[in-house]
Image: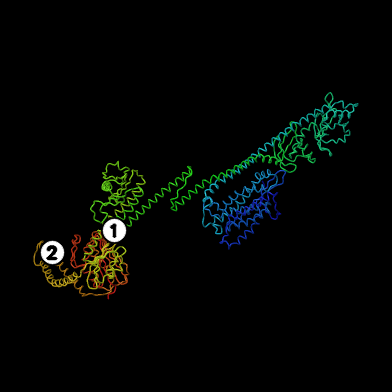
Amino acid sequence: MPISYTILFPSRPYLTPPKDFLGFAAWFVFLFLIILIIKRIWQPLPSRQQKNWWLFYGLAILAPFSVILGGFEFTSLNPGLRSSGFIIFLFATIPWMIAAGFYGLFPAVIVGLISGISMAWWGTHNIFTIVETIGMAVLFAFLVRQKYRTQMFSLLRIPVVAAVFTGLIFIPIFILNQILNSSGSLAVRLDYGLTQTFTLSIYRFVELLLGGLFCSVFYLSKNKLWFTPKSISPTPMEKRIEYRFLMTTLPVILFVVLFVVYVDWRVASDAAKDLVESRLRGTAEIASESLPYFFESGQNLIISLADENLLQQNVDVWLDLSEKIQVIPFFSQLYLFDQNGNPKDGYPIRDVDQLQLTMEERTGIDLALTGVHFQIYTSPPKISDKSVLITFITSITDNQGSPIGVLIGRTDFLTNPYVQPTISTLNNFTKSLGESVILDDQRRIIFHSNMNLQLLWSMYPQEIPITANLFENSSVSGGQQLVYHQPLTGRSWSVLVGLPTSEVQELALRIATPLLGVLGLVIILVVLALRLGIKPITKSVRSLSDQAALISQGNLDSPMSINSVDELGQLAYSFEQMRIRLRDRLEELKQLLLSSQSVSRHLDIYAAIQPILQAMMGNDASHARAILIRQVTADQISSAYLSIGIGKENEATNALDRQLFEMMRQQDVLPIPNLSRFKRFVIPGKEIPGSILAIALTQENQYFGVIWLAYNYARTFKEEEIRYFRTLASQAGMAAANAQLYATAELGRQQFEAVLNSTPDPVMVFDDANNLILINPAAKQLVGLFKETTPGLKLDAVIEHEDLLELLKKDTINRDTSREIQLTNRRVFFTTVSPVIRNDQLVGKVCLLRDITQFKEVDTFKSDIVSTVSHDLRSPLTLMRGYASMLQMVGEINEQQRSYIAKIVSGVDSMSKLVNNLLDLGRIEAGIGLKLERTNPISLAEQVVLELQPHANQKNIDLVLEYSINRDTYIEADSALVQQALYNVVENALKYNSLGGSVKVCVSSNENNAMFEITDNGIGIAPIDLPHLFEKFFRSGRREAYNQRGTGLGLAIVKTIIEKHNGKVWVESKLGRGSSFYLQLPIRQG
């Protein structure tokens, strides 16, 4: 099949209209269907593409040029016919495919219309090309712009996949259009459409594939102009099961129909071809079997007429030959030649020139005189004759067998009586437009059934097989025909018998029509059966869907009708059972919710347990009772348990209350289907329940009682019922546990309030959000400390005193905080803030204020006395130490005496140090010798750390200095006193820390104050010691602290030094975890 690239310009454009009214009608019907489809799937023009309409106009202009550019032309050559070809247009589909992806349905239709007109005008010249192109544009635009969500439709949005799908859909349409656009009978059209146009349809499919591949570049590169759905929706198959079923079965049915039609047509065509071949073979065999008898008869007759007496001088040759012709009417002409080849005489023509011997006949005469006894030749017909002449030549021999003359006999092939049966048989085919041909050994036409004189004696134009066989060629009239070739036995002649292929197609149509009719009827019945068969299923499914919708909306009171026992009936039954069970479960959940709300709403056991008993009693039970321990109520009751119930009380219920309360301590559930047969209970009275169910009430392994149901009749308890009642019983157990906790808490609260109200020290309790919870009367009587004392107020709205407010706001999650505060009436309170910790989380804080005004006055008086005494003791102590030191110089002393002297000196030194500390404390308290200067707090801390570092190394304690201020920061203070205070605190941290501990000194500041924070992880300070920590001569009574020697004045001196600098000192400590001391000094004094 030759292939060439063809450009259509400047070819002559034209359109070939349909051959008949059926073609015109089909064209308009196709166009009308396309308009309906466009209206059905109409898509609005995209607003975002309005600024790019110039591209649409460009595509519309390029559409004709994409056709004129042409493509590859495939040309097929059939013998005897003109060449025919079809062009694959490489660019024709690209413009309307781009318009579909960029602009939508209607622009694609417009560009497709222009492209279809151009292709029909210049290329195919077929008017159906226009509607085919528009239809393909519509389908392609729909596929690439649909918004369905399934994977199949997602793939169909890819241009190449959409093009392949469009081509597959339109292949049957291409074939149908070719059938409708062709001429001839229905059989001819069907044969042409089913056998000849499939290849042409494949060419159109290739055009679609090329355009889809080109447009896929825009899709895969995510070009912003190409359509991309912003939202997806369910497909029609997902919306209705009927559509899904039909869309699944109809393509299969359609494929089966097309396949069966094609197979039926092929089988019918093969059967018709076999029938025609059988008929042609029979005719050809009859003709081929009768013609040899003609040759044999002619040969025998001419030999019998070749008598040597004809050459004698006295014989009238003309008369003798005329008699012989009349005896056997075979030859129409006889002529005699002598041994030299000279003519003697003949009948009915006597002049040899009138005989018009052919060159073959003359050659035959010469051959006969040389010894060839018998020959047969064909001669062309005369001008006025309609038949070819058959010449029989034989030699006349003498007694010795030598040729002495030649006799020629001619016969008219058509009029010869021995050929008439064959001619009659062959002429029968002319009645069915068939053709019969007899060829001689030179393939010249001796006989043609059409009686066309121009064909006689002409060469047969077509190739013929060597053996007897059926083949297809073109008839003299130009039509296709089936020809059977039958060679003659013993001769090189052959008989050709042919029928037009239309006869085969008509016969095939007659064979296939009944089956196609039955197939069409079956398909219609199958489709109707599918539609009617799916209706009950869809109706049942729709009923189930409606029931499911009612269930989802909470309507559980509409029963479902069950009309069958098949799978759908079983499904409906399951739905109904689900509805009933769901209704029961929802009712149970409702009761559980009410019970749970009652438990959570009420702490009183009577109010909490009543809804639970109502839920358990339901519609069937006669009694529902709860027997609880007496601790669930704060009321004083005389019985060992508390009974709460619904139903009439009598002797039986009271007896069951007592016995079940004791029995259910050892088991969880006790179902008794028939109480009269249960002998373990002693039940007085006549009104005995028929059956009971008892469930123990436990919470966190604590027994709270029993809840039990009674029924007037014997019954069994299902597992799901017991499970439901146990759930309600768990709610009752929780209610009992809550009630017990509430009763216990209420008693504790009353006791706590009594204690607080009787406590003379002011006490306040705050929660973790710093809201006031409790405040005792002693605190409310303090003047200048509170703004409001209403519980629930914030800390800022309650506390008026700034020092107390600052202390309460501090983070006290890890340790207690204490400080002395002074009221406006000059009363001094030692304040301690202790955190309330639960599960390592701060849940509140307690503030305790202790009046130490009298202690402060006594302490001041004591300080004056001690100062006076200390001053008077300095001189005697100095004298005692001097003389004790001189004892070693005046004479020899032993080791025991030296030990005594050392102890005296050590005691005197300790007493001197105590006296010096007392004097320093007094001097500091009196404000004598306070030397203010600008000093660096970091330098003070470094000097203290440097002096105490050896002590820290001796105990393997990690002493660390950290600071978060600039070294340029200075404060106004007495550097010696501040260093002494800092020294005392750090020394205590090292003294009361264990080996391998750590002490950290941190220096920080804000706008107004500098802060020294000394933190250790030592033994900590007991909360009871915190109020007295900064008092003179105070020593903790704990063994760990008492083992360390000291005067009890170090922290008192620290407090005095800091307060004289208008600063503050406080401590936060957690017993066993360590302490933190805070020394706060103002940056500027005054």
Which numbered tag is attached to residue 838? 1
Mark nearer the viewer, 2 or 1? 1
Location of residue 278 with respect to 795 vertically, above or below? above
Q: State the image coordinates of residue 1082 (x, y, percent, origin top left).
A: 28, 72
Location of residue 889 with respect to 68 vertically, above or below? below
Name which of mark 2 and mark 1 comes first in the sequence. 1
The kind of residue on which mark 2 rests is Lys
- Few, some or many C-alpha atoms within 10 Å of disc 1 (few <14, some 14-19, many ≥20)? few
Please state which of residues 33 and 292 is positioned toward the viewer in this rendering: 33
Please state which of residues 845 and 1082 is positioned toward the viewer in this rendering: 845
Residue bearing mark 2: 903
For mark 1, give the secondary structure: strand
Q: State the image coordinates of residue 115 (x, y, percent, origin top left).
A: 64, 55
Report the side of 71 relative to 849 (left or right). right
Q: Quadrant of residue 885?
A: bottom left
Please state which of residues 498 and 186 is positioned toward the viewer in this rendering: 186
Quadrant showing the C terminus = bottom left
* Residue at the extreme right of the image, as rendered: 314
Distance, label 2 to label 1, CA atoms, is 52 Å
Please state which of residues 978 and 213 is positioned toward the viewer in this rendering: 213
Q: State the image coordinates of residue 929 (x, y, percent, origin top left).
A: 21, 75
Report the side of 898 relative to 980 (left or right). left
Location of residue 1058 with respect to 627 vertically, above or below? below
